[in-house]
Image (cartoon, rainbow, N blue to C red):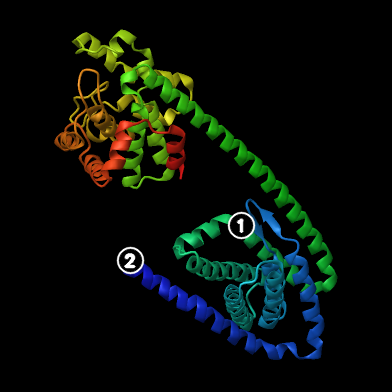
């Protein structure tokens, strides 16, 4: 696997460091001749001013600042061809070099990906114009999408090389961040270009007004969105604090099992991550582990803390904690997604569990996960009337119960998780309380 990663990065390095730079030099050289005719200097001057203006008036969206100079470049390609696009890209690069910390190689690569995008879009524009029958609106939208796509692919390739990330994941993250706004600006650039082409440069004035309006709207929209996200984070923080207090109150009912809920939640989280559940489901499993024994609040102390063996009647009472917990959460009107974890974590694959006698896949996945982590912690934890089992014996019990008490696939994953942990770390988890807030943060990450 290591060799494949190195080979992939080597290929990306060759393409980015040499391919981008060589392509930039070739495209730049081929466009120089177009800058010389005297009638073009007015165009170049106009696009220089537009570039300066666009570099200092970015569109702010969410946590990203989006430059609008790509829209200026795009309009230049539509109206005049590749040479105006190249000129504008170079002016932008010079401005950025003065505004931010200058890195020659990265600057050359950035110019390279931009000039390649310009060249591809300009070539397609000439090809479409050669037919003479395609509507400008359709062709402009098509070219805007091509510009976005090519620029996205090339930028993603460069970023993934420098930050040693996956190209696909980098592109996905970039596309998710600002695609709709980017395409809107490009389409507006196409509309503006056609207006200038038909009615002259004065049409730039209403376009500039439209741009300022859009910039203002986006600024306030994303400012309000950030405030909303902040409120959501505050609510999540409150929930985490609530769960921390709830776990402590559950375990406080039985001081012999202090930290049990956190450990069950920890092992459940590890199983969920091992089988590839998404982050939100991993968090659900963890929180389900925190709350799985909440029903013990409704069990009398003399039964819950009895040191000797329980009578059949007392055991039946203990078993009611799953139903009591289910009713508590149901009536609370929150964490409804955790109801299966609370009610069904003592169900068995062979149907001999409680409270509903569910079998096999009838048992929700979250409950099957927590059944393993709950049983393991119960086996290895010390009790006043017995010492906890050695880890290997507990794992052997998990193996023995696979297919009857436990989901066999999940049991196999759990055994693998425990066996690959260093002994010191394993004993640390078994022998002490875990930090619920820290564990919740890890489940979210």
Image quadrant assignment for residue 83:
bottom right
State which tag comes first along the sequence, 1 or 2.
2
Please name whichever residue, 432 or 50, is drawn nearer the observer in this view of the structure: 432
CA separation in Å, label 1 and label 2:
37 Å
Q: Is residue 12 visible?
A: yes
Residue 436's place in the image compared with 321, above or below, is below
Which mark's residue is nearer the viewer, 1 or 2?
2
In the rendered image, the residue lying farthest to the left is 400
| Circle number at residue 249 | none
Q: Is residue 364 visible?
A: no
Viewed as shown, does residue 198 lie left or right of 289? right
Q: Secondary structure at mark 1?
A: helix
Please name whichever residue, 115 or 21, is drawn nearer the observer in this view of the structure: 21
Q: Residues within 10 Å of mark 2 (few under 14, many from 20)?
A: few
| Circle number at residue 2 | 2
Q: Position of residue 126 (x, y in %)?
A: 62, 82
Q: Residue at x 40, y 45 (%)?
A: 278
Q: Position of residue 114 (x, y in %)?
A: 61, 74
Please name whichever residue, 148 or 261, is drawn nearer the observer in this view of the structure: 261
> Where does label 1 land, which residue?
180
Q: Position of residue 28 (x, y in %)?
A: 64, 85
Placement of the N terminus among the 4 image quadrants: bottom left
Q: Residues within 10 Å of mark 1 (few under 14, many from 20)?
A: few
Viewed as shown, does residue 94 lie left or right of 146? right
In the rendered image, the residue lying farthest to the right is 202
Q: Secondary structure at mark 2?
A: helix
Residue 371's place in the image compared with 300, above or below, is below
Q: Position of residue 436 (x, y in %)?
A: 43, 32
Q: Are marks 1 and 2 in contact (CB under 8 Å)?
A: no
């Amino acid at each position: 696997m290591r060799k494949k990663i190195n080979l992939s990065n080597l290929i990306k390095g060759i393409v980015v460091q040499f391919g981008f730079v060589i392509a930039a030099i070739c495209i730049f050289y081929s466009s120089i001749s177009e800058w010389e005719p005297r009638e073009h200097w007015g165009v170049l001057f106009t696009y220089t001013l537009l570039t300066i203006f666009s570099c200092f008036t970015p569109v702010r969206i969410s946590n990203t600042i989006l430059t609008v100079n790509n829209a200026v470049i795009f309009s230049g390609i539509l109206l005049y061809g590749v040479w105006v696009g190249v000129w504008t890209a170079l002016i932008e690069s010079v401005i950025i070099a003065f505004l931010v910390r200058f890195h020659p190689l990265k600057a050359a690569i950035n110019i390279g990906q931009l000039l390649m995008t310009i060249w591809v879009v300009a070539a397609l524009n000439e090809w479409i114009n050669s037919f003479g029958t395609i509507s400008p609106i359709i062709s402009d939208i098509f070219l805007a999408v091509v510009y976005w796509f090519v620029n996205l692919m090339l930028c993603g390739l460069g970023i993934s090389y420098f930050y040693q990330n996956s190209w696909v994941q980098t592109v996905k993250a970039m596309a998710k961040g600002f695609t709709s706004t980017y395409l809107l600006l490009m389409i507006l650039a196409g509309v503006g270009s056609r207006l200038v082409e038909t009615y002259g440069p004065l049409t730039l004035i209403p376009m500039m007004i439209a741009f300022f309006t859009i910039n203002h709207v986006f600024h306030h929209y994303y400012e309000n969105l950030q405030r909303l996200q902040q409120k959501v984070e505050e609510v999540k923080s409150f929930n985490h604090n609530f769960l921390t207090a709830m776990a402590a109150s559950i375990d406080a009912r039985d001081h012999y099992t202090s930290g049990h809920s956190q450990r069950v939640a920890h092992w459940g989280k590890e199983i969920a991550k091992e089988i590839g559940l998404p982050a939100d489901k991993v968090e659900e499993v963890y929180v389900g582990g925190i709350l799985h024994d909440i029903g013990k609040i409704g069990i009398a102390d003399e039964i819950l803390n009895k040191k000797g063996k329980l009578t059949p009647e007392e055991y039946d009472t203990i078993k009611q904690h799953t139903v009591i917990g289910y009713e508590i959460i149901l009536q609370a009107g929150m964490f409804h997604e955790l109801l299966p974890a609370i009610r069904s974590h003592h169900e068995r694959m062979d149907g001999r569990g409680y409270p509903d006698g569910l079998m096999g896949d009838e048992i929700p996945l979250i409950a099957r996960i927590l059944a393993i982590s709950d049983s393991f912690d119960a086996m290895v934890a010390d009790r006043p009337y017995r010492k906890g089992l050695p880890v290997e014996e507990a794992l052997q019990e998990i193996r023995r119960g696979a297919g009857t008490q436990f989901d066999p696939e999940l049991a196999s994953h759990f055994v693998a998780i425990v066996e690959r942990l260093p002994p010191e770390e394993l004993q640390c988890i078994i022998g002490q309380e875990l930090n619920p807030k820290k564990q919740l943060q890890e489940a979210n990450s």
